[in-house]
Image (cartoon, rainbow, N blue to C red):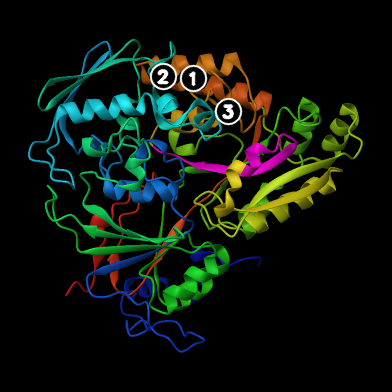
Amino acid sequence: MNHLNRRGFLLASGAGAALLSTASTAAPAADPQGADETGNDDGAPASGELIIGAVSAVGSLDPGLAVDTETERICRQIFEPLIGIDQETGGVAPLLAEDWETSADGLTCTLRLREGVTFHDGAELTAEVVVANFERWGQLDYLYGFGTIASSTPLAFPTVFGGFLDQETCVLESVEAEDDHTVVLTLSEPVAYLLQALTQPAFGIAAESVLSESDPGLVSRNPVGTGCYQLAERAEDERSLRLTAFEDYWGESPAAATVTVRALGKSFDRLRELNRGRLDVYDHITADNLRPLVQAGRLILQRDPFSILYLGLNLEHPVIGQHEVREAIARSVRRSALIESLLLDGSRSAFQFTPPALAVHSDDAPRYDRSLTTAAELLEEAGYDGEPLRFYYPMATTRSWLPRPEAVYASLARDLTEAGLVIEPRPVRWDDGYVEEMLADDDRALHLMGRNGGFRSPHSFFGPIFGQNGLGMPSREFHYQSEEAWDLMDQARAEQDDEARDELYRELAEVIAEDIPAVPLAYPISGLALGQRVSDYPMSPVLNERFADVALTDTD
């Protein structure tokens, strides 16, 4: 068979339950250099220390600017939002706000802050500080400049509220401190998913001491929040950083006093370091590394699928701008090849952009199954004459939605070539600025991208991927403009009836499927493997994984 999935291996071995139940005591896998997991090798974790293998360097530690999951992972530890997530149910839970109340018309949300919370600099959490954070998020376009924001992935604040504070499209009218520990949000239109959206790391509250209008980058250089961990050190190459437990944290103390996060883009490198005892957590395991992990008795945890992998299309490209060509591309790809050979067991083919768990798939949306005959006819109808199509894809990385980018590209390029398209590869290392380099090329035709859902709402996918960028403009990723799609998003945002809102999202799915600004490929499963020193890890589909909740087997 093409790959060994976890379930298949365990069933074949007849020892699946034993492997998983003895994961913390099983003998470590052999290492070619003779290292083991005793902690004696250079770089091994000390007692009370946790070392996590991430997949890319962290970007700006300004939570309002965080748009990639690796940066959000760190922001979650340093900053805390007002609303938390219940790890058992996935619903909203108290965090910095211990209680809240929403008016019957959905236009007012009153949040009561937890008392006795202090920031890393010793300052007290107050309603005035929360107001200052909202005001700052609402003017990031002004603080960082129109060009910077316009060129980036859409940010959380304009995606949730329809725009920045200085724009007519923004539905957040005001944020006020009613008293020292009460904040009132007033909206011009309801935001049905408001509480869920406020759980995102982008809404992490920063201390007033770093909210400088004249120096907006201060938050990133000196991140000061209320989180269980604070930044202790960041390597010059930005490929590793160290967090230390905040002694005056309002909640329970973590098992790990120190957490080091190392960026290792290649999956094999993370596997090797886990086997050497230099990592406690190997995140984003890939199908080709599953066999040695299972054979070594590793405890493997998988997240519920809540991400989308897609093939992006540049609608301003003279060839891609033709609907017939886009449909030909959609009818060329073999999703089964990706699922069977490149993704973890449990991953599913995608024909729409929201995971099945959100239950807003439309049965009436066009579905483009593979048909080389139809693809060839469409290309002939469009007058395609073999023009090379630049295809961007990232290298040396693993994402929750893209475990093996080089292999996924190769599979798709083969499919597209079979259909008669001429592909011109454009590989870019993720840490060398893959997203920005791809967006900067006006002649690009295709690209690989994806998204992990930030909160449990269809808007968490539709808004950031296909909505406006918060400046009244379409996202630069596809140059997709659809007043019908944007109007449906706005209607769904304000609709308080669950069934009516779901129906609006189904209509939106139909519009996007008809326009084909991108081709959905898969809902990938992501997972991680634990070293012997970790007995449990707080898995979350939306990646709400606080290091404070990691359980160590040895904390002496």
The N terminus: image quadrant: bottom right
Residue 154 lies, with reference to residue 400, above or below; the image says: above
Location of residue 101 in the rendering, given as x and y in whole percent from the top left corner: 18, 22
Amino acid type at circle 1 is Met
Residue 489's mark? Answer: 1
| Residue on which the image places disc 2 | 493
Specify few, some or many for label 2: CA neighbours under 10 Å numbering under 14, 14-19, or 20 or more. many
Q: Which residues are magenta?
A: 437-454
Decide if residue 488 is on the left or right side of residue 198. right
What residue lies at 33% left-to-right and 64% top-to-bottom? 260
Magenta stretch holds residue 238: no
| 546 sits to left or right of 556 | right
CB under 8 Å between callouts 2 and 1?
yes
Number of marks in picture: 3
- CA separation, marks 1 and 3? 15 Å
Label 2 to label 1, Cα distance in Å? 6 Å
Relative vertical location of residue 113 with respect to residue 175 in this rendering, above or below: below
Coordinates of residue 347 in the picture (x, y in percent)? 54, 51
Q: Is residue 444 magenta?
A: yes
Q: Does residue 458 show up?
A: no
Visible in this render: residue 439?
yes
Label annotation for residue 475: 3
Q: Amino acid at mark 2?
A: Arg
Tell me which amino acid carries mark 3. Answer: Ser
Residue 254 location, quadrant: bottom left
